[in-house]
Amino acid sequence: MNTEVIKRIRKLNQQHSYTSIQMHEAVARKAGLSGTDHKYLGFLLERGQMTAGELSNITGLTTGAVTGLIDRFEKKKLVKRRFAEDDRRKVIIEPITPNIMALLAPLYKEFRSKSEMLIASFSEKEIKVIEAYFLKAIEIMNETTDKLNKK
């Protein structure tokens, strides 16, 4: 493949990533969260309830930092803690989805609408190419993350 095309796509990918970070930071500030807390809340929304240890593994945070994170979320009534029935030493973190959505959905409303219109502007063939790119890119990022976490 032409190296200029690769450079162009790589540059666009970087710009997309940086712009995404800026937008999510702005959303987080409006929601009264830090940018990282906002994204970690997303893990809970996407994956559902999990132990504090599982959240630590996913985020790379220490267990102490996860405790602080959960304290902040709990104070805002975005999650609740409960003890595992089989082992009371395990703490299960449950997202309170209606509260999270009430906080975040209004902040994403216009973005979602415009994104949906953009997606609708592509043909079915183009959508398949976009999906293929994202699926492969996510796979590459996950592989890279796994390798870096093992070192």
Image (cartoon, helix red, strand yellow):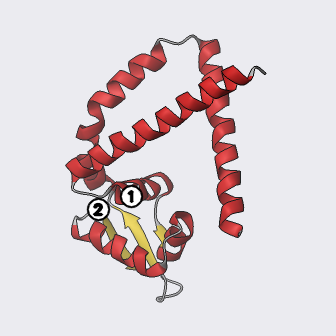
Note whether residue 113 is visible: yes
Q: Quadrant of the C terminus?
A: bottom right
What residue is drawn where x is 50% and y is 56%? 47
Disc tally is: 2
Q: Position of residue 128 (x, y in %)?
A: 65, 21
Q: Is residue 30 left or right of residue 139?
A: left
**In the rendered image, the vertical position of residue 7 relative to residue 55, given as above or below:** above
Please tell me in which quadrant of the rendered image residue 148 appears: bottom right
Q: Which residue is mark 1?
A: 36
What residue is drawn where x is 42% and y is 59%? 40
Q: What kind of residue is marked 1?
A: Thr
Label 1 sits on a secondary structure element that is: helix
Q: Is residue 117 left or right of residue 62?
A: left
Q: Position of residue 31 (x, y in %)?
A: 23, 51
Q: Residue furthest right?
A: 1
**In the rendered image, the vertical position of residue 105 relative to residue 34, given as above or below:** above
What residue is drawn where x is 33% and y is 30%? 111
Q: Position of residue 102 (x, y in %)?
A: 23, 47
Note whether residue 131 is visible: no
Crowd class of label 2 (few under 14; some 14 to 19; many from 20; radius 10 Å): many
Discs 2, 1 touching: Cβ within 8 Å: no
What residue is drawn where x is 67% and y is 20%? 5
Q: Is residue 74 left or right of residue 148?
A: left
Q: Which mark is residue 78?
A: 2
Spatial CA span between label 2 and label 1 = 15 Å
Q: Is residue 130 left or right of residue 104?
A: right
Label 2 sits on a secondary structure element that is: loop
> Which one is in front in this view, the residue at disc 2 or the one at disc 1?
1
Mark before the other along the chain sequence, 2 or 1: 1
